[in-house]
Amino acid sequence: MSGERDRPPDGRDATREPVLYFPPMNAVRSESRGDVLVVTLDHPPANALGHAVLRELRDLLPVLAGPGFRAVVLTGAGRFFSAGLDLYEIARLRESPEAEDLASCFDDVVTGLFALDKPVVAAVNGHAIAGGAVLAATADHRFVLSGESKLGLTEILVGVSFPTSALEAVRCSCAGPHLAELLYRGLTYGPEEAVQRRLADEVVTGSVVERAVALAGELGAHRPQAFASSKRALRAEALGRMRAARTSGLDPVWQTWRSEETALAIARFRERALGKKAPAQGM
């Protein structure tokens, strides 16, 4: 699979309109809207970020970074943009080697989206909680649909630490006087309050995806090199810290997620928030 418009494999004239090759997708949908690629999380019921979604997003990164599209829109299907990392899957994989792959995949996706040097616009169609809000924070602009949706960084209520990739994306996109409140209190906010606290940039009535596609098209119409140079400069320090955290492999923060104490904290949060009984012992 390649995100580049390479010579067609069947030997046809390469000067003709080239073809993009997409990886197989089940939990993530992509749709071309001219020069804009709309990427939709479609993993009911809450578009949680488990292996299925994260692997497909990671596989899609070369397409997003390649020359086939000039801008990207991220959105979700249904009532959720994303509910964040799948706590059930984290519990199940705690003692498995796959746990490290899940963590590495999350970092690859967040860092990869944050590092794209083309315009990325988030169309927050519904609830964006914890890792869902982090995913939105990788974008250059975040539209949120007006209504009853909630946005928030609830990691501290769960009892887990922010991986460096997530913290740096949030630090960049949510910078301002409310950043400490977002991180330390773990509150969730409606669309208007979320904009006030820099969890989103603009409230939209009507089609949030159409508004996002319009802005993505506008930003993508600029000369790519000019846009990319400004974006790289704005995000260079954050990307440097993201990459430095992984110089020896997995970000060390993830090891704290596998501790007995953190496992119990996650189990208790699930019991409180989701109505699922916590196991007698750690997960």
Image: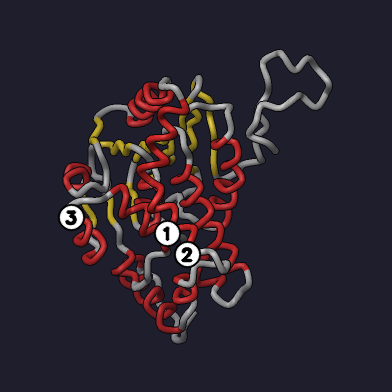
Residue type (three-letter) at the residue carrying disc 1: Arg
Q: Is residue 120 above or below residue 177?
A: above
Of marks 1 and 3, the one in the foreground: 1
Answer whether residue 80 is visible to the viewer in this image: no
Q: Position of residue 195 (x, y in %)?
A: 21, 43
Helix, strand or loop status at disc 1: helix
Left or right of residue 118: residue 153 = left
Alpha carbon distance from label 1 to label 3: 22 Å
Q: Position of residue 54 (x, y in %)?
A: 54, 52
- Tags 1 and 2 in contact by the CB under 8 Å rule? yes
Q: How is the image coloured?
A: secondary structure
Q: Quadrant of the N terminus?
A: top right
Residue type (three-letter) at the residue carrying disc 2: Ala
Residue appearing at x 49%, y 77% in the figure: 258
Residue type (three-letter) at the residue carrying disc 3: His
Alpha carbon distance from label 1 to label 2: 6 Å
Residue farthest along the bottom direction in this orientation = 281
Q: Position of residue 247 (x, y in %)?
A: 54, 64
Helix, strand or loop status at disc 2: loop
Q: Which residue is mark 3?
A: 178
Badge 3 crowding class, 10 Å Cα cut-off, few under 14, some 14 to 19, many 20 or more, is few
Please state the total of marks drawn on the protein image.
3
Helix, strand or loop status at disc 3: loop
Q: Which residue is mark 1?
A: 241
Point out which mark residue 99 bears.
none
Q: Position of residue 98 (x, y in %)?
A: 62, 67
Label located before the other in sequence (2 or 3): 3
Alpha carbon distance from label 2 to label 3: 25 Å
Residue appearing at x 35%, y 69% in the figure: 275
Point out which mark residue 245 bears.
2
Residue appearing at x 56%, y 69% in the figure: 248
